[in-house]
Image: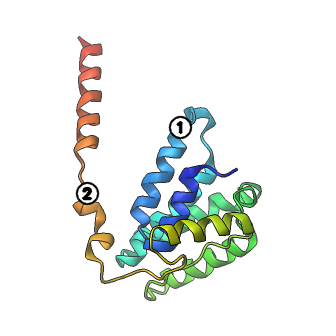
Amino acid sequence: MYPPEYIEFLYHFHCDRDYFECHEILEELWKKDPKEERKQIWVGLIQIAVSFYHYRRKNFNGAERMMKNAIRILKNETASLNKLGLDDEQLLHILQNTFGRIQKREPYKSIQLPIFDQNLYEICLTTAKERGKTFGEPSDISNVFLIHKHKTRDRTDIIEERLKNWHKKRKRRE
């Protein structure tokens, strides 16, 4: 019923609070569709995760920009949010409150995405339990790796992809 990537996103968003991984997972799902058919709902959810990644790192400007964009997108995706088992009104209310907290430079606080589909919620609980986690666990703000993940990740695949694309462009020019 729900894409497995979405379940993974929910797991990371609510269990280990690995917002960087949330972004990576949904970006891959988003890219599966042809460019002209890519769904904005995934962009909105990605931007929530990116906003929380920045917020937790006290990058308030980045967090504010991403949250503002997420809210703008998701206001137009209420039906898609509901299809994903999320309460659109409650989610937008939570995001607006978080946006206000970011603007006031208040400390980071973990949130729960409002899942109304009981089956989806049970899947999330089971996934968390199977992995030894608690669904809804607040972020471990002492986990430096998690908070600064973009600085520590292996970028070999990204560098290789860029190099491959550079060679393709060069061959076309010759």
Q: Position of residue 13 (x, y in %)?
A: 50, 68
Q: Disc 1 residue type?
A: Lys
Query: Judging from the image, what secondary structure is the residue with disc 2 in?
Result: loop
Front-lying residue, 81 or 62: 81
Q: Disc 2 residue type?
A: Arg
Seen at 70% across and 62% down, the residue is 75
Seen at 29% across and 22% down, the residue is 169
**Where is 44 relative to 121, above or below?**
above
The label shown at residue 129 is none
Measured in 3D between alpha carbons, the distance from the residue under mark 1 to the one under mark 2, in whole angstroms, is: 23 Å
Write down the residue under mark 1.
32
Image quadrant of residue 158? top left
Q: Residue furthest front?
A: 130
N-terminal of the pair, mark 1 or mark 2, is 1
Residue 82 located left or right of residue 91 = right
Image quadrant of residue 164? top left
| Image quadrant containing the C terminus | top left
Write down the residue under mark 2.
153
- Few, some or many residues within 10 Å of mark 2 (<14, 14–19, 20+): few
